[in-house]
Image (cartoon, coloured by chain):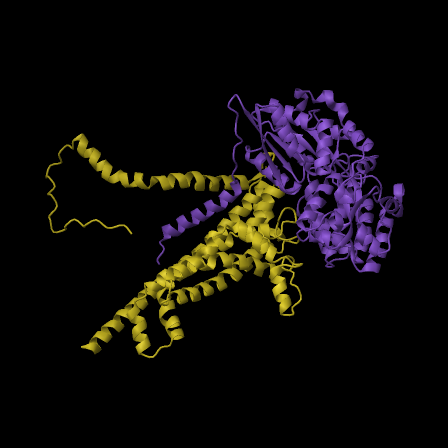
Chain colours: A purple, B yellow
Amino acid sequence: MKLSRRTTAAAALAGAAAISLVATGCSSNSGGGDGETIELTITTFGTFGYEDLYTEYEEANPNIDIVANNIDTGGNARTDLFTKLGAGSGVSDIVAIEEGWLGAIMEVSDQFVDLTEHGIEERAGDWVDWKYEQATDPEGRVIGYGTDIGPEGLCYNGAAFEAAGLPTDRDEVAELFGGEDATWERYFELGQQYTDATGKAWYDHSGFVWNAMVNQLEEGYYTSDGELNVDGNAELRERFDQLAEATTNGQSAAQTAWDWNGGKSFVDGTFATFVCPGWMLGVVQGQLEAGGGGPDTGWDFADVFPGGAANWGGAFLSIPTSSEHPEEAAALADWLTQPEQQVKQSAAAGNFPSTLEAQEELAANPTPNEVFNDAPTGQILASRAEGVVAQYKGPDDSIIQENVFGPALQALDRGEADGDTAWQEALDLLVELEVE
Amino acid sequence: MTSTLDRPDLAVPAPKRPATRERLTWRQRLGRFDVKASPYAYISPFFVLFGLTGLFPLVYTLVVSVHEWELLQGQGEFVGLENFANVLQDRFFWNSIFNTLSIFLLSTVPQIAMALVIAAVLDQALKARTFWRMSVLLPYVVTPVAVALIFSSMFNEADGLANNLVGLLGIEPIQWKHDTLASHIAIATMVNWRWTGYNALILLAAMQAVPRDLHESAAIDGAGTARRFFSITIPSIRPTLIFVIITATIGGLQIFAEPKLFDVSSAGGIGGYDRQFQTTVLYLWEMAFFRQNFGEAAAIAWLLFLLIVGIGLINFFISKRIATAEGRVIKKRTAKRLATKEVGK
């Protein structure tokens, strides 16, 4: 075969075209209504628990047709939304935004509908105050209806605790960890006892524990003024060293997050404790199903958290300015985040509502969660939500969590680095990834 | 194939040009224009589409690459070549180039070797030939995403099929998703599984065009199967082999779906927590859609483009040499045939 110069040039151009196509991506448009029936698209992620509510809303509003899309993880939902915002089209009428990447969204808050135009101000008192504040941009525009918040409790495996001679009753477990004064020292101390006694890991992997430890601080990777605050942050470093020591001593199961060996690691006793924000209960349930486990696997939920109250995640429903039906979309998002609906959502997904009324409802009416040994998870979460303060999330918060500390903690988990080298690795990555 | 039209008889003399240039009628001029311009109109759809979907993004990517450009905020200041300088100093870029070339070598070399063997086997007089030929093409029908998901499960470190098999041999479980070399082998396996059969069929087509009498005479001269394969089959299909190598090169340098989906736990899939199997296209994706730095992502796209052009040029020179080699083979062949004819007389 003989290639002429021109063919080569054309082939090279075609190759370049293929690459540039990769960069440009593609998107599809959301459908419009025909005047009679209005089609509203909504994108959520993880376990949101909205399916029944959609049906209910459609029945009450025959002219609304809800087209729902759920993305498996918050991380993928972030990529999906950012890509579509970058492309300038394709964002659904209502999109769920996670607290962890709200900081990046706030940089372009003008691409979202100001909900004060749709009367969200009248509802300001519905939510815990910090939830409403989080959704308010510096210009005072409110861009999201709060759905859930992520107060963290401790998931533990009763069977594993029993095997190691630890108490299994959830109140006793809460006491064991120190009740109101639970600390990470105590958590890792018990972990060492457990690991020494059984030879098994205490927590699934360092990343989630680290996330909890950071989220709990008054200021995380950023100061409240939005300044990056990692290098030279003694508080962070101290916690990192605690975690590094425990991990080095075998307390981490070095699991792959969001996979957990296809859920099997939740079933076969690979680890005994798991940090559980409200929404994580739904994730655990899904993992148990995937791994062939269920209520008899022994998972339980204790009203305690090392280091005191902590919040991880929680979401908002936002409406992009590109939506063709902002009025109807706002009505639906408003309805979905009403206390009454939040209670139903919590029952379906196990997550914890962000409105005061719904929280009180859950606290007053304990409902046993059969997956977690009949623990009244809603009530426990209401107790865990006390004293939670929102932490300022900077624009690159999720990148620091995943791409800066992620690799460093994995190296730690796998025994490829000790605390000092892992911390240094994180600092190097922070510089190399040009985090602002 | 298309049938060719009969050639106009050249023996018929062309109509003589009138000595004085007559004024052409409108129809005649239109006819002339038609003859000259129509071919371009017929081939224009490709170029119009290519301009829209190929050339425009290419140029636009260049524009993006010389600006500060955020995914969400859009265009920023003009920064000249700063993005290129940053990318060239970025250890993750070079890491991705290394990974790309490593996976490319691990996939292309065994793939083409296997394809050659399979094609040679299929070239024999087999029963139910079409069945066998279609069978080797089956993996090609499966989308890369499905392949990646299936193999990702097979290469699961805890209790995947691959580790169960090596366990039978008494080997310690391999860290398919953490060890650099092991992960490259795993990804190369996916690529090979998908493309070997496809390449085998192309090579098979070439092999069938090799004159049988060459094989027969070689067999009469006492050449064994292996000898005939290496001395007759391979030299005869060299041009096709080069084509297969070029397409495999282009494909190999653009591997994306396989490493993206092989381990989705780190930041939605950036090719391993330590970027052990992050290819350049995957790094481009991370830069653009995870880190939101469109400017540098565009610079990466251009550098990868230049790399492919570079390798394309190398291929061009090689194919030129092969073409001359082909000429030599044909000359030899004719000489041989003439010689046999002489002997036969």
Q: Residue A282 appears in which quarter of the rendering?
A: top right
**Residue A229 appears in view:** no
- The vertical placement of A13 against B137, above or below, is above
- The picture places residue A61, in percent across and down from the top left corner, at 61, 23
- The vertical placement of B246 against A155, above or below, is below
| Quarter of the rendering occupied by the C terminus of chain B | bottom left
Looking at the picture, tell me which residue is in the foreground, B88 or A142.
A142
Looking at the picture, tell me which residue is in the foreground, B129 or B26.
B129
- The picture places residue B250, in percent across and down from the top left corner, at 47, 54
- The picture places residue A89, in percent across and down from the top left corner, at 54, 32
Left or right: where does residue B195 sit relative to residue A63? left
Q: Residue B51 appears in which quarter of the rendering?
A: top left
Left or right: where does residue A220 sit relative to residue B306? right
Left or right: where does residue B60 sit relative to residue B234? right
Looking at the picture, tell me which residue is in the foreground, B55 or B334.
B334
Query: What residue is at 66 percent from the left and 54 percent from the top?
Result: B274
Q: Report the label total.
A: 0
**Residue A50 appears in view:** yes
Q: Residue furthest bottom?
A: B222
Q: Residue A90 appears in which quarter of the rendering?
A: top right
- The picture places residue B149, in percent across and down from the top left corner, at 57, 52
Looking at the picture, tell me which residue is in the foreground, A61 or A154.
A61
Query: What residue is at 57 percent from the left and 47 percent from the top?
Result: B284
